[in-house]
Image (tube, grey):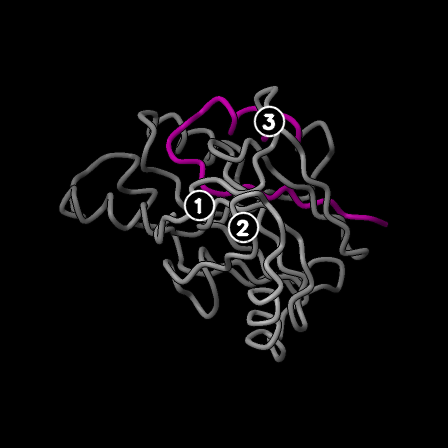
Amino acid sequence: MTKKIGLISDIHATAAPLREALTLFQREGVEMTLCAGDIVGYGDEPELTVTLLSESRCQTIVGNHDLWWLVRSGGETAGPVNDYLRSLPRRLELTIAGKRISMVHASPPDSLLDGIRLLDEEGELITEQRQRWSERLANFPADILVVGHTHQVFAERLGHPLVVNPGSTRFNHTCALLHLPELRVEILPLSGRRPVPAWNWGMERG
């Protein structure tokens, strides 16, 4: 029987597209929801964002913006956002429907900044980048690698794993459904907007 996993990333403290994605996942009957980090940054709704993630029992990892938030706040300030961000791991490992899933924010083993950037500013695949990451991930042990950070949307076999970046709910207007054990990925549009395959091109930090 097919199991569906909801994938989101780079929410950046913007509640509306996150809420829409979670509603879509509920309608699709997902087994669980995974978030590849960057809960805060850019937007102005961190508390509501954290509430939505907590209430949905989304399994989440930390992103670079999340760590920067904690540094700016001193890391010890009491409050639900700081408590939530401090609780997040840098990576997540799961086995579902016989498939091993690994999730990191940028790239393995647990980088928050060395992102997997496969697309040019027009959203076209860069052959050299695909080859580079295929070689780097040739012996990666998991079947699926879920990443975020770069604000790019793709599902590509790179070396051994199928690598999925669902894109930013805020900037790419996307989320994704992962079907297991088939390893099939659906990219779903959000906010009534046309999906943006590559947002923020040229910035070193997503």
Specify whether 160 is left or right of 184. left
Question: Quadrant of the rendered structure where residue 40 is?
Answer: top left
> Residue flagged by tag 1: what amino acid is it?
Trp
Residue in the image at 53% along x and 58% along y: 103
Disc on the earlier residue, 3 or 1: 3
Q: Amino acid at mark 3?
A: Leu
Q: Secondary structure at mark 3?
A: loop
**Residue at horizontal 58 percent and vertical 41 percent from the top:** 197
Label 2, label 3: how many angstroms apart (C-alpha)?
22 Å
Q: Residue furthest right?
A: 1
Name the residue carrying label 2. 120
x and y, in percent, of residue 46 in the image: 33, 30
Q: Which residue is mark 3?
A: 190
Mark 1 vs 2: CB contact within 8 A = yes
Sequence-wise first label, 1 or 2: 2
- Mark 3 in CB contact with mark 1 (< 8 angstroms): no
Characterize the local packing of mark 1: few (<14), some (14-19) or many (20 or more) Cα atoms within 10 angstroms: some
Mark 1 and mark 2: Cα distance apart in space:
7 Å
Camera-side residue of 137 and 178: 137
Q: Which label number is shown at residue 117?
A: none
Q: Secondary structure at mark 2?
A: loop
The residue under the point 45% across, 41% down is 10
The x, y position of residue 41, in whole percent, is 32, 37
In which quarter of the view is residue 25 placed?
top right
Residue drawn where x is 48% and y is 68% of the image: 108
Query: Which contiguous range is marked in magenta?
Result: 1-24
Numbered circle sitting on residue 201: 1
Label 3 and label 1: CA atoms lie apart by 20 Å
Nearest to the observer: residue 170 or residue 96:
170
Q: Disc 2 residue type?
A: Asp
Q: Is residue 28 above or below residue 66?
A: above
